[in-house]
Amino acid sequence: MGFRAQILVSALAVAACAQPESAPSASANAPRIAPEPTQRSSYLLGSGDQLAIRVAEADEIPDRPFRIDEKGDFDLPMVGRVHAAGLSVGELQVKLVKDFAVFIKQPQVTVSVTETRSQPVSILGAVNAPGVHQLQGRKTLVEVLAVAGGLRADCGYRIKITRRAEWGTIPLPGATMDAAANYTVAEVAVKGLLEAVGPQDNIEIKPDDVITIPIAEMVYVIGDVKKSGGFVLGQRPSVSAMQALAMAEGLAPMAKPSDARILRQIPGESNRTEIPVDLKKIMAGKAGDVTLQQNDILFVPTNAFKKLGARSIDAMFGVGANLAVYRP
């Protein structure tokens, strides 16, 4: 390499080293704001919520949670009283960045919710403590039912959940949106939930959810059975005629199972229709079992001839007893 070429290379190297650093962009000088959590993007802060606030280079901010009072405010060193109710976490962060910018250059503020007490959930129906309950932190469906005192013994077999559309579709199969697109509705089977058959059914509950547990429907067994009355279906949508008969502890001695009938409510009417059921054939395996729907009545009549014969036998025993007692 010639002398002139060496000088040219050296000059280029010096020029490269002498280049000034690129000027920082406008965004680099802007205050840094922690991104708003996506998990509760639509959650608005309210009274009772507890916040953790971190401000870089601000030793005056204690390492303790701040509780939003009944007026929706909380006291923060340096900036004073802050109104937080009705704001999202991201909106509060933006507000605090502006407040601290008076004291700190490019303040870095992080806000997180450590405890929530402004999340009302309505739990209605067959629970031991129905009403409006305040969630504290994230709660699943099972945990919320426990807060309501647990399910009653007469609870139905389905749990209905209604959720505001702002929280998105309920993550359950068969979830539907109402006509006005304000709410989504879904149902969960009680048995599967309690037995943990489908863990995916134990969803996280959101603020303003309405959880409804209807009282279980009943079937009735009357007539010539050992224990007539109404029987709660509980966590079953239906029972068979044989299951209902077992609840009634079986047939009485004078029953006529071949002439049994199911009395079923006609939709929209007060009358019932009669459905013949031959319990004798079902018990003998000569006919298939039938399903009783909610509020069905299974009627087992009395065999008139058996009853008449039984009365005659009772009379004979009565006479015999009198003779035995009064024999000279």
Image (cartoon, rainbow, N blue to C red):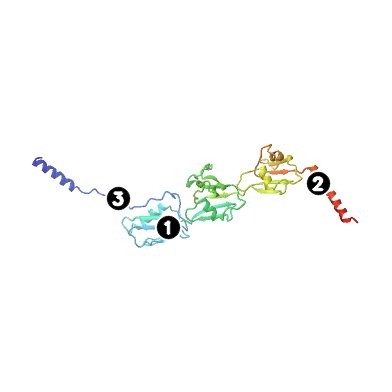
Percent across and percent down for residue 264 are 68, 41
Residue most toward the front?
328
Q: Is residue 112 visible?
A: yes
The disc labelled 3 sits on which kind of residue?
Ala
- Which of the labelled discs sits on residue 310, or is there none? 2
- Under mark 2, the amino acid is Ala
As shown in the figure, which amino acid type bears the numbered disc 1? Leu
> Left of 272 or right of it: where is 161?
left
Residue drawn where x is 39% and y is 54% of the image: 93
Residue 28's tag is 3
Q: Earlier in the sequence, mark 1 or mark 3?
A: 3
Q: Residues within 10 Å of mark 3 (few under 14, many from 20)?
A: few
Q: Secondary structure at mark 1?
A: strand
Q: In the image, is 326 to the left or to the right of 93?
A: right
Q: Position of residue 34 (x, y in %)?
A: 37, 52
Q: Position of residue 206 (x, y in %)?
A: 49, 50
Circle 1 is placed at which residue position?
51
Q: CA distance from mark 1 to mark 3?
A: 28 Å
Please give the label number shown on residue 181: none
